[in-house]
Image: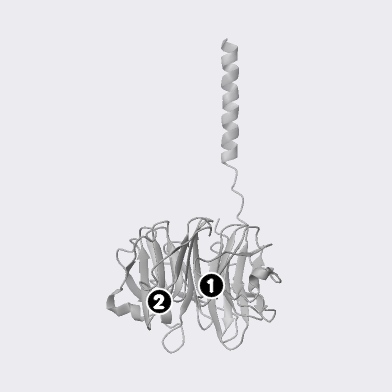
Amino acid sequence: MKLNIFLVFISMMLITASCKKEDNKPEPAKKKYAWVVGDKDSTEYGMILFTPDGGDTWLRQGQGAAALYGVSLANVWAVDTNIVWAVGLNNVILRTSDGGSNWSRITPPVNRPDIDLLSISLLGSNDVWISGSKGIVYHSANGGSTWSTFDSTFFRKGLLQGIHAVNQQTVYVVGQADQWSIIARTINGGQTWDTIAPENNYNIHLWIGAKSIGTEHIVIYGGRAHYIYSHDAGVTWKNDSVPNTGGIEGADINCLTMLDANTWWGAFDYECIYITTNAGTSWVKQTSSLPGGMFLVGIDYYDRNLALIAAQSSVSRTGKIMKTSDGGNLWELKLHTRSWINKVSFIKN
């Protein structure tokens, strides 16, 4: 009997050791998959580009597919290696569930081809928020099987360029209406909405997008290098701007990505790339090798070293993709396209 107990004890120790060894195994590296979307080109098919290696090589997807014919795409959200969503002009919603081998159109909640969908934000793979022109906001909690729409008059039927879901309850929508900006927020999943009016009439600056880290840290950014931010879940806000960005009054912040509460990376007009590591107290300009007349319209990061930027020309219908592998000390041109490109998304999971 004592021998049996001893053997059981030894077996349990071996199992425990084995489990600990498994626990110490490093997690597999996330794949460096990213997607870029843009306008239709001379083939009349919308531009979807995919990289399997963090931006060194690019493959076009969807060319020849009926779902992309005549479509210009404005934004993209890559959930994982299989599921990617994109939205575009004329009320188009696209989705792939096989990494882009096949793209299909998702039926929008209203039949309004006069609506342009401009921004998308997901929580997981099925909780989808979309915003666009004419005050349109869509929400689906089941991957597009059913949708909710919201009162467009509340959003003043404006051009809602940015939407960002912080969590299932808190969502920000930003844009312009009647030459003024609007910042709207729900804290109950869309049941009710309120608006945010920054001090000193700061809504005179046209807002383009919103991003967050966790629930506490939110940045809303836009025209002429202006932004507002909160470090207390939107209870209080601070107005700010990035100095000396170019142009007469400053360069628009077209896209911003947050690595953590203090580190933000921004893509601006006039070939400007800026990064802050202290929540906006100071900004460092990074050198771009792009020619003049390029607007940087999309940015997303894989880690603190690897990031991609989507750029479009202000003087021709061309686009460019840039990559950094060293945190922005060097940005390399990786692809030139014959149509405007708009946004880039690394997989989120």
Which three-letter amino acid code belongs to the residue tagged 1?
Asn
Specify whether 159 is left or right of 102.
Answer: left
Badge 1 element: loop
What residue would you read off at disc 1? Answer: 91
Q: Which of disc 2 and disc 1 is earlier in sequence?
A: 1
Q: Which mark is residue 126?
A: none
Among the 4 quarters of the image, the one containing residue 214: bottom left
Among the 4 quarters of the image, the one containing residue 260: bottom left
**Camera sees residue 317:** yes
Badge 2 element: loop
Question: How packed is label 1: few (under 14 Cα within 10 Å), some, or many (20 or more)?
Answer: many
Q: Residue at x 57, y 41 (%)?
A: 24
312 lies above or below 100? below
**Farthest left residue?**
200
Pick whichever, 206 or 251, lies toward us: 206
Is there CB contact under 8 Å for labels 1 and 2? Answer: no
